[in-house]
Image (tube, rainbow, N blue to C red):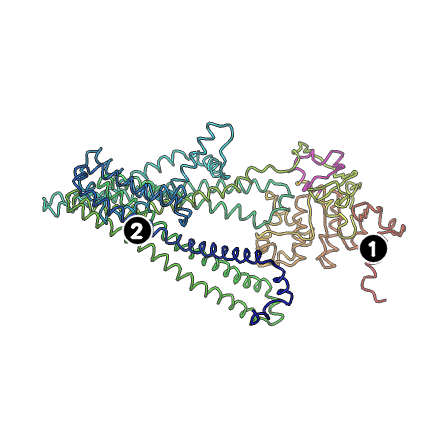
Amino acid sequence: MSEHAHWLPQQEPTKRARLPAAGRTSSVCFSKTCFFLGDNLCSMQKMSYFFPLFVVSLDVCVVHAIRLAHLSPLLLSHPFITLWGGGLIRAALLLLLTLTYPGNLPWMSSVKGIQSLGVLCLHFPVYTTVLWVLGQPTMEQLWGWHSWERVLQGYVVTLVAWLYWSRYVSNILSSWGRKILALFSNKPSEKPKDNTGASLKRLMGYMKPYLNRFVFVLLLVVLSSYGEMAVPQYTGRVADWIINEEAPDAFTEAITVMTVMTIASALLEFVCDLTYNITMSCIHTSVQGAVFQTVLKQEIAFFDESKTGELVSRITTDTNDMSEALSEKLSLVMWYTARFGFLLFFMVSQSWKMTLLTCMGLPIIWVIPELTGHFHQTIAAKVQDSLAKANQVATETFSCIKTVRSFANEDGETERYRRRLEDTYALNKKEAAAYAASTWASSMTTLALKVCILYYGGTLVTRGAVSSGDLVSFVLYELQFASAVEAVMRYYPEVKKAIGASEKIFEYLDRIPQVPQEGSLAPENLRGHIEFKNVKFSYNKNDKTEENNLVLKDVSLEVKPRQITALVGLNRSGKSTCVKLLERFYQPNAGKILLDGEPLQNYKDQYLHDKIAVVSQDCVLFARSVRENIKYGFENASDEEMHRAAKLASAHDFIMDLSKGYDTDAGEKGGQVSGGQKQRIAIARAFIRRPKILILDNATSDLDTENEYQVHQALLEQAKDCSVLLISNKMSVVEKANHIIVLHEGTVKEEGSHDELLKKKGFYAEMVEKQNKGFHRQ
C-alpha cells in the first residue's frame, strides 16, 4: 500500500479508514461483479459476430443427419415425408436457436430474418411439391435435396429471395397495404408527398393533341421489338439444322427471313424515333412558350423577389431537361420495356428453368456494382465541388481582369488556379480507380451469371431437356435481357425525376399575377393630367402599414398637361417610386392616382403603356440593331418617324457615323455604344411613340453639355403636346421646369417654380446652394 500511496490524494487514506469492513467488502464484490458482467458482455458481443457461422455449421450437421436417416429402412420408401419432415426439423431447430440464443444478431430474430430461415428450409420442399402437382419428374429432387450442391444452392436462393424482398417486394406490399387501408377507411393513406402523378397529368394534357401519333409510335415499338427478338429464335433453329445436317434450303430460308426481319425492324425503329422526337419537340416548344408568356405577365414584385438566373433556368434548363428526359429517356424506357416483354416470353418458351436461374442472378448483378459504385459516387461529388471551386477562381479572375491587370497579379491568379487544378487532379485519380473497380465488379458479376447459365444449360442439353439450338437462342436472349432490365431500371427513375422536376414549371404556369383586374378605358384623346391624392406605398409586402416601412407617406402632387413638372429630392426620397406607380408596376397601399380624373387602374394596360414613355438613368438596350431598339414595341413606325425621333434626341448624327448606321448591333445591354449614346437612343425610343406623358428619370445624366442642351430644347418643344415629368439631380436642368415638387423622406416638402422656391429659402434653396458650392474652395 505504501508503494502506491503517492498515486492517491492526501485525504484518501483517511476516507478509506472511515469505511466499515462490511462496506469495503460489499464495494469490492460490486466491483468484481461489474467487471465480470462487462467481460461477459464483451464476450457475448464478440460471439454474436460468429453466430451466423455457428448457425450454418449446425444446419449442415442437421442436413447430414437427415441424409443418414433417409437411408434407413423406415424412411427409405417415404421420400416425401423425409423431404418435408427434414425441412420442418431444420426450420424448428434454427428458429429455436435464433430466438433463444442470447448472442444472436438482432436482424436474425427480426421478421426478415425469420422469413429468410423459412425460405432456406422450405423452398425445396415447396418446389418439389409443385413439380409433382404439375406431373413433372421429381426423382432427382427427392433423393438429391440434401446433397452439398443442393444445400449451397439453397443458401444462394435464400440470398436472392432476401434481396428481392428487401428491395422490391416489401415496398410494393407496403404501398398496396396503404392503398387498401385508404379504401376501407376515411383517412387517406399516409405516404411521402409525391406530385409526379399530378405533373404527369399536366404533361398528358399537352400530349393529348398528338394522341394519334403516340398510338402509332407504340404500334411501331411493338412491331420493331418483335422483329428484333425473333432473330435469336431463328439463330437457334439454324444451329439445330447445322448440327442435324438438314437440308440446306431450310438454312437459306432462315437466313433470308432473318435478313428481312432485321431490315424491317430497323426501318420501323427509324420511323418510330423520327415521329416520336418530332412530336416531343412540338410539345417542348409549346410548354416553353407557355412558361415564358406566363412569367412575362407576372407583377414586377415577382421579378424583384425572383432571381433572374433562376427564372431563366426554369424556362430553359428545366424545360430542356424535361424534354430531354421525355424525348430520349422515355423513348428508351418504351423500347426496352417492349424488348423485356418479348425477351421474357421467348426465354420462357425456350427453358423456364434457365429463365428462373437468370431472374435469380439479376439482383446480385445489380447489388454488387451498386455497393462498389457508392464510393465512386462520393468521389465524383467531391470532383464536382473541386471543379466548381476552380471555375469560381477563373470566373472571378476574368470578371475582374482590369483589377488583376492593374495590380499585375496575373502570376498570383495563375498559381491560385493551378492549386485548385491539382486538388481536382488528385480526386480524378481516386475517381478513376473507383470507376475501374465499379466497372470490374459489374463485368465480373455479369460474366459469372453467363457462366452459370452456360453450365446449367449444358447440363440440360446433356439430359435432353433442351436442344443445342434452344441453348444458343437462350444465350442470345439472355445477353439482351440483362441489359434491357438494367436500362429500364436506370432510365425509369430519371424519367420519373424529370416529370417530378417539372412541378416548378407548372407552378409558374398556374401562378396568377398579383395585379388588379385590368380596366377598360382607352379614350382617343388623353390630356395627360396626373394627380396623386394621399398616396401611401411600401415595398415591404409583409407589413405595408408600418410607418417606418413606407416609402411614400401621404403624398399629394399634380402634373399638369403641356407643362414640365420636375421632381427633386435626395436619394431614397421616393422620386423613382412615383414613376413606378405611374407605370402601374406596383399598386399604392392607400390613396388614389388619377389620370384625367379617372383612377389609373381603370385604363387598359396596353393603352396606358402606349401613352406613357419612360427614360431612366440606367436605360437598357437590347442586343439588337439600333433600328430595332428605337422601334422597340412600336415596330410599325416608319423610318421617317425613326429619323425624326433620333434627331430630337440628338442621336441621328452619331448613329449615321456607326459602321452600319441604324443597322449596327448595339451589343448586350448596349455595350457597343457609350453611356451618353445609349441614353440618346433610349430618348429617341421614347420620342418615336409620341407619348402623352413623358417621364425622364435622370435621363440626361451621361450627356455632355451640347447634347444635353439639344435634348432640353427638344423637351421644351415636346412639352407643347404632352405632359413631362422630369427627375434630375442637376439643379441647372430642374430650373427650366414650369413647376417643381420637392420630396423629402417620402413626403412633399415644398413646391412651386424655381424662383418661388429660392425666395422661400427652404429645402430646395439649400440643395441649390450646396450644388453650386460643391467643388468651390473654402
Question: Residue 467 occupies which quadrant of the picture?
Answer: top left
Q: Dot 1: what SS?
A: helix
- The answer to if 718 sits in the magenta stretch is no
Residue 437's place in the image compared with 720, above or below, is: below
Please report the bounds of the magenta region as a residue range.
Answer: 581-608
**Looking at the picture, which amino acid does disc 2 mark?**
Ser
Q: Residue, x 34% and y 52% (percent of image)?
A: 53
Quadrant location, the N terminus: bottom right
The residue at which mark 2 appears reads as: 57
- The answer to if 595 sits in the magenta stretch is yes
**Looking at the picture, which amino acid does disc 1 mark?**
Met
Name the mark nearer the viewer: 2 or 1.
2
Q: Pick whichever, 770 or 234, lies toward us.
A: 234
Which numbered disc, 2 or 1, marks the residue that appears first in the sequence? 2
Question: Residue 276 occupies which quadrant of the picture?
Answer: top left
Q: Pick whichever, 669 or 92, lies toward us.
A: 92
